[in-house]
Amino acid sequence: MTIPIDLRRNDLHSLQEQIYTQIRGLILNGRLAKSARLPSSREMARDLGVSRNTVLYAYDSLKNEGYLDSRDNAGIFVSDSIPDRCLDYVSDGRGTRLLDREPNRRPELKLEVTAPANVHLDRARPRIDFWYGRFDRRNFPLNTWRRLINENLSRAGSNLSEYGAPSGCHELRTAVSSHLGATRGMSAPPERIIITAGAQDGLNLMCRLLVQQGVRVAVENPCYGSAALLLKSYGADLRPVSIDSSGLIVEELDATDAVLAYVTPSHQFPTGATMPLERRHRLLDWAQKANAFIIEDDYDSDFRYDSPPLTALAGMDRYDRIIYVGSFSKSIGPGVRVGYLVLPEALVQPALALKSLSSYGQPWLDQIVIADFIESGGYRNHLRKLRHRYHESRDALVAGLRKFFGADADFSGDGCGMHILWRLPNGIKAAVLVAAASKFEVGLYSFESVGAYEVGDSNLRENCLVLGYSTLSPAEVTEGIERVAAAVKSLAA
Amino acid sequence: MTIPIDLRRNDLHSLQEQIYTQIRGLILNGRLAKSARLPSSREMARDLGVSRNTVLYAYDSLKNEGYLDSRDNAGIFVSDSIPDRCLDYVSDGRGTRLLDREPNRRPELKLEVTAPANVHLDRARPRIDFWYGRFDRRNFPLNTWRRLINENLSRAGSNLSEYGAPSGCHELRTAVSSHLGATRGMSAPPERIIITAGAQDGLNLMCRLLVQQGVRVAVENPCYGSAALLLKSYGADLRPVSIDSSGLIVEELDATDAVLAYVTPSHQFPTGATMPLERRHRLLDWAQKANAFIIEDDYDSDFRYDSPPLTALAGMDRYDRIIYVGSFSKSIGPGVRVGYLVLPEALVQPALALKSLSSYGQPWLDQIVIADFIESGGYRNHLRKLRHRYHESRDALVAGLRKFFGADADFSGDGCGMHILWRLPNGIKAAVLVAAASKFEVGLYSFESVGAYEVGDSNLRENCLVLGYSTLSPAEVTEGIERVAAAVKSLAA
């Protein structure tokens, strides 16, 4: 018999590999039946125009794996013992399922995994888009990036070819340490910093370390949905705490009996409230009294417009209780996937062990580039530039709302960050306005669609919009609000 | 009074920020006492040579934060209500600890975190180092990397400034899919692939999805320690299964009552056994019968020397039960931190939800560069080159052991991978030889020091060494083994 084998001399695979693979395929898709006799290695070599050793090598491999048998001097045969049911696995890709798909003893999945919708991924956006927290690609420091990458590739040494420390690259931890000292009033030695793949990865590490089934965790109500869902996924018993215009109401914490709290004191998400100094001290006191840890998510504190940034909770933490979560996603870009944790001393060793058990660490090149960006002063200039742009857009947004919706337009969170929360006038429902605005090519986003999470009822969900302005120029903001006003008018008509 | 404020005109911080920060510092370190009166904004402006608005801005911020009070027309004072204990937090960095450091109600840490020792990190190595699984920096494709990075930076578009899909960049999933089809006989559509930060990150995701307290997980005995510790950290009840020269003994699985198994069929870690076809089929049958999932860790299947690679378990999986874990750490370099999972259909959606909840995804640039490297054929050439080098070193190692320790030198795992397991002759103890060899500037590593994990007793731990050869030239290997022979001789003396 002649076996249909098609050899390519310039293939990346050697000739013996090609012979092996093709015969195996013929057996598995049934074109070479069980017990079928194969040509001798000599015949096959002649047919294919290759050396006999080449064929012998392929045959030996197939014999070793049980596809072929050699029966004394009778020749080479397809094995009898290949299980029937494997014979069609190549032909139809997967074969048919022989048994019930539903497992009866499969380990129970630990959780109902509920992840926030990835609105991020839908890049077809309306002409004027008030999506929250988005980073404008025109603001990415591409030329600096290219230069720093090339410089560091030249001196990469073994950094690309060896495992790094699970805590992250020392240069970056040092740079983050000095940046946080200068901008957030924090005394965070590099030894207490762990580099992560963004803020969410840092939160995840902390949840895995601290949260188990039934652990009571206080959260702002409303709060950042991705954090709430992550906490719940580890079994946390979420205890909602009300907020007012100064953020989380500390007095309510005692009643929660919580041992962990997740807070956003710089710019409460989504209301934008900033927690004043006095309340921060009371929050720290609660943590000490309750023997609790506090996770401080400082997600957009780099953008504060009307006053210098407040000292972070972690900068005031005399009790070693604050877990500080930071990220470069909002200041450099989410595509670089770098963030960091600053940990209480008591948590450093367990967190490092967990980090090395979970993923070893982050890519070296991304880390060293950010480290150089910070140390050179480029990052602070970049932040200043961003802050200036966002400031102008924020001003246009505030002015636009007042112009088109009256001096008493009701919004909060304009002192900081990349969004405000707008309480809609005249009983307009958020969902209705979102739909109407889309006809005017304006993207508006409700409370829920930006991933805000709320326990129980409130009127925020129905009556508020989260207006992000970080990718819009002042002129675009103004035009956008004018269009929103037209959309509102169209509702009345 | 005059306040000691030192303004810098060319500072990155504005003048009002500098005034704010310095006054805050003076209050916090006690140099401005409670109730101390500050100069009026007019006086201060004159003293400092700045506009009055600049001072007013700083004062307002300090008042908003509770550092200063203005008492009607009496002037501006340091607030009375700053808690006493915060007054020294700047001066001594952290202040003293007022209460017991030990928590009484702190959420229990979920686990005794036990991570493998990071032998990787100690880069001061003996002259000839048989460390396992190390990647030689001379083999890193640096020029290609530089070219691909620069090309992709030029067309980065919004990829650096937006979130990517949690599953990873589409181009890379497509490239991995075709690579696995060609080299591992797998039909793995990109939709079933999730890009991870290396194999360990993929394992971690799977453990988090599937393992909870008490879930029975079958592991090879001995097995890869980082996997065993990770499984245990999620509460797995590890059920050891013996291995022989064909890997895991499938017959023992029934008695384990396991619902998940972790296996390394290509090159069992650490013994190096390869599981033959027939046993692979029986392993799959067990999974189906037991309604179990199997994690196939294919950690160094790229390097197979004497025959074509075997089809992966995942390539034979007609039951949708194989979770395939792969990585570029051993083939490109650990510093790039990229790996992947190929999932059973049933697990794709929960795993993606979990991935987006945990860390969103991997850095885009690293992914696109690897995708291009694969698609251009460069990766296959690179692998072939590595395979050739490792093959030569492997040959030198086998020849050296036979030359210096006799034709019956007892080792396994030489068909594949980057290490062999050597059973020491004449009752020599591993620890003793490791110490002796270090005097001859040779790095040898015991079973445990490479992270192998064993349940119960065996003689492997005491009597075996894991010899890695991936960073050694054939000449270095030969010299190394000659030195080991000298070390053995020195023991007898």
Image (tube, coloured by chain):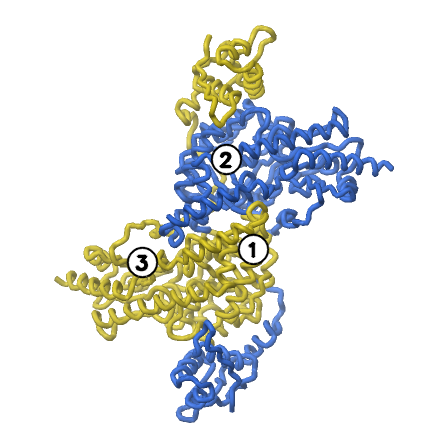
Chain colours: A blue, B yellow
The foreground one among A464 and A143 is A143
Q: Residue furthest top?
A: B74
Eye-nearest disc, 2 or 3 = 3
Label 3's element?
Answer: loop
- Could you tell me if residue B59 is visible in this image? yes
Eye-nearest disc, 1 or 3 = 1
In this view, A280 is above or below A482: above
Cα separation, mark 2 vs mark 3, equals 41 Å
Q: Chain of mark 1?
A: B
The number of discs equals: 3
Of the residues shown, which amino acid type is indicated by label 2?
A: Phe
Are the residues under badges 1 and 3 in a single subunit? Answer: yes
In this view, A434 is above or below B424: above
- Quadrant in the rendering for residue B145: bottom left
Of the residues shown, which amino acid type is indicated by label 3?
A: Trp
Which residue in the protein does label 2 denote?
A293
